[in-house]
Amino acid sequence: MKLYRHSFVILVLVMTLILPGCWNRKELNELGVVLAAGIDTVGNQYEVSVQVVDPSAMSKQRIGDRSPVLVFSERAPTIFEALRKMTTKSSRKMYLSHLRMLIMDEATARRGIQEPLGFWFRDHEVRPDFYIAVAKGRRAKDMLELVTPTEALPAMDLYKSLEVSEKSWAPTAAVNVRELFQTMTLDGVNPVLSGLTIKGDMEVGKQLENAKQPLSFAEYQFVGIGVFREDRLIGWLGEEESKAYNYIMNRVFSTVGRVKCPGKEGDFVVEVTQANTKMNPMIKNGQPHVVLNVFVEANIGEVHCKVDLRDAQVFNAMQQAAQDSLAIILEAGVHKVQKEYGTDVYGIGEAFHRKYPKQWKEWKKSWDDMFQNDLKVEMRFDYNLRKLGKIIGPLQKESGE
Amino acid sequence: MTIVAMIVALSGALLEYRRLVQNKSYRDIIMSVCLLASGLLLGILQMLKVKLPSLMGGITTAFEPFSKMVESWFS
Amino acid sequence: MRKMILTTRQATFWFTLHQLGSALLVIPSTLVFIAKQDAWLAVPVALAAHLLLLLLYFRIANRLNGQTFHEHVVSILGKWGGGLCLVVFVMAYPFLTFTLVIRDLGDFLTGVMMPETPSEAIYLLMLAAVWYVVHGGVRTIGRTVELLFFAFLFLFVLLTVSLIPSMNMDYILPLFENGPKPIFLASISLFAFPYFESVLFLFLASHMQYIQQWKTVVVRSALLSGGMFFLVVFVVIGVISQGVVADVAYPSFFVVRTISIGGFFERFEVIVAVLWYITIFFRLSLLLYVSSYALAGIFRLKDWRSLLIPLCTLGFFIAPLTWPNTSVQMQSIRAWPYYTVLFGVLFPMVIWLIGSFRGNHGKK
């Protein structure tokens, strides 16, 4: 009995040696950690580029002049093929779990993103937490080749910049893969992706020189928002329109806005500390009608005109001016999306779906058309200017006028 | 892999049978050997790449009409 | 051998984990595919139906009088008839489910975590652990479950709590978009899998001190697991919206991968995967125990332990045969409830009816 027990325990122990083993063992020095990937369309093939970190290049004793990241690219009709084909160029297997950014060029985005994205959803290694952007007017491969000064790893630079910028600058929309997946599967909403471009001299920007002096030769910039219908890019929103998009989507955390001074030459700037938009769909005369209730709280951040901020009346006028200017921005943004592009990126259709499921069933088929022609958008504002900051008046002599 | 599993199963079973023989539980041994043999037989067939029918495939074909029926009630 | 007694707490935990195992992983996707954003409503419906079904099981349990369930069946249907019925029942239900769960585990691990590992290695390791704990007997299982349940609970709370911040209530709306029908249809799936399997608890009724205790345990574990299903389905829909839930194979795992709180509280999906390991472990142990215990009872063996290794071996080799590919599996999930009705409802119903008939007869 005892012998039997013991021998079995030994057997089990031996099994644990052989079995759990290291079937899927991946040593760090055999892997190329992919931080960013780019998809370009070349002819009818995809050119997939990946930005790979060499883990040892990140350690303290790194060899001076070598780049901490490498870019590999390969062409194939499908993404997966291209990725595997890369092993012919690199000694390391691409490890996708730490992907932070996926960039597509405009041609790919216009051709439809659903197919090239499918792989990134299906593969087991990829975590659904990376951001997606469209390279505006540039190749995705260029975006990956840029040497960024702030961070040694360009992908991390992009990633962090996107996160910070989304929190403090309204025109930036950071869209991660989960949100994209959601907007692609729901009927009453179309996806958007943020645009990314490079300014400056790209040829120097690709060299390590780019990071060797205070002012870089080339730098990336997130610009505007790309508007999609289904999975195809159909156009871009400019800065103001992107801002409108983020206000309506309730994605403004903090931003600044320039407003013309009431009755005076010059501008003042408000810092928005809180913004909240409620979308309230209703049916008027059998037509869709949506009310946007925009609530904003802001402080004064900069004043370029001579006004007496101690005067409550002046202050109220400024508040009104700020509200009006926001209204103009939002209306222009909605107008552009609604009339020019005619694609419901705001998810207004989804709001109707939630509130009027029965009506939605009828509308679902022709929603794009209804959104463009029949939908009335009404906005109501509640704009509150609150504080002045550390000083009160614009810096000027009392007897100035 | 399959061979490792077979060896583990066999050696485990043999150890077990020593105890069972001591306890004179012959009925247990017969039952156990039958099951074990059918298990190993299946394993050998799989190793020889014999095409065996899929269990759930069979159940699905047999019970799909019911599921279709109920689904039609509810839609 | 009768001294194998489970405490109320041990049994409750064990039964709960049994019901959660593998269902927690697959069920959200199935429910959402049918009932869209209303899927969470299917959980209470299924639970209510289950509690009704439990009344039938309780009637049978009342007649056991200290007998085990298989002895009871044999006493009702006769030595040969009962024996044959039981063998078919055991092989076609708890044992088949046992192999399916092994396969599920292998598919899950190789599908989303370790695609290059052969699933046989995973089966073998899991079966060794399950064999070990079942070999120890009911009391060993009971103590193990007492220990691991709290690890499970901790992980479950971690999972749900860390998901709540990213929930968006809009995804739950609109309620009853397609009327109540899809909700009922979805609830059938949950009702059948895992709740029909509660019939197996009858085999364990003799391991409780009083039948009354057994009844409270069954009800409690149903409520506990039902509550957890409800939470998970609700949270998962709220976080990733119905379109995505229906489209991913293991939503409750997928959703963990999206968690990122404060930029550092992220990427712990492998830790949470331990949760499914624990539930599947106890699910397997219950199925294996019931299979071998019942079979040993039917064939009047001296020790049910002697069947463990053969059954594990058989399970190991049947697992690759269950379905050739994922599409067949997806399809089989839809037919499965109607197959299990035979065992979960029809069989106990017959036992009860014949039992009442015989019982009355006997008194005359």
Image (spheres, coloured by chain):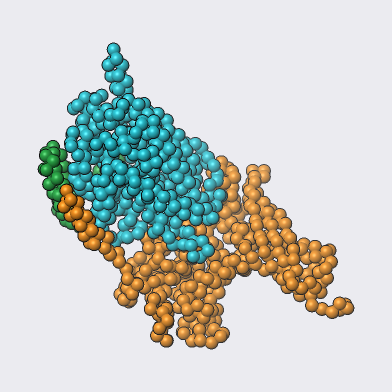
Chain colours: A orange, B green, C cyan
Q: Nearer the viewer, residue B6 or C253?
A: B6
- In the rendered view of the protein, which quadrant contains the N terminus of chain C? top left
Q: Nearer the viewer, residue C279 or C300?
A: C300
Residue at point 39%, 36% (across, down): C218
Residue at point 32%, 71% (across, down): A27
Q: Nearer the viewer, residue C326 or C64?
A: C64
Q: Is residue C133 left or right of residue A41?
A: left
Decide if residue C250 is in sight here: no
Residue C332 found in image quarter: top left
Residue at point 47%, 68% (across, down): A101
Decide if residue B26 is in sight here: yes
User: Residue A72, percent across and down?
Assistant: 38, 75
Residue C287 found in image quarter: top left
User: Residue A141, percent across and down?
Assistant: 44, 75
Please determine whether, in this image, residue A312 is positioned above or below residue C66: below
- In the rendered view of the protein, which quadrant contains the C terminus of chain C? top left
Q: Residue furthest top?
A: C364
User: Residue C123, percent across and down?
Assistant: 26, 53
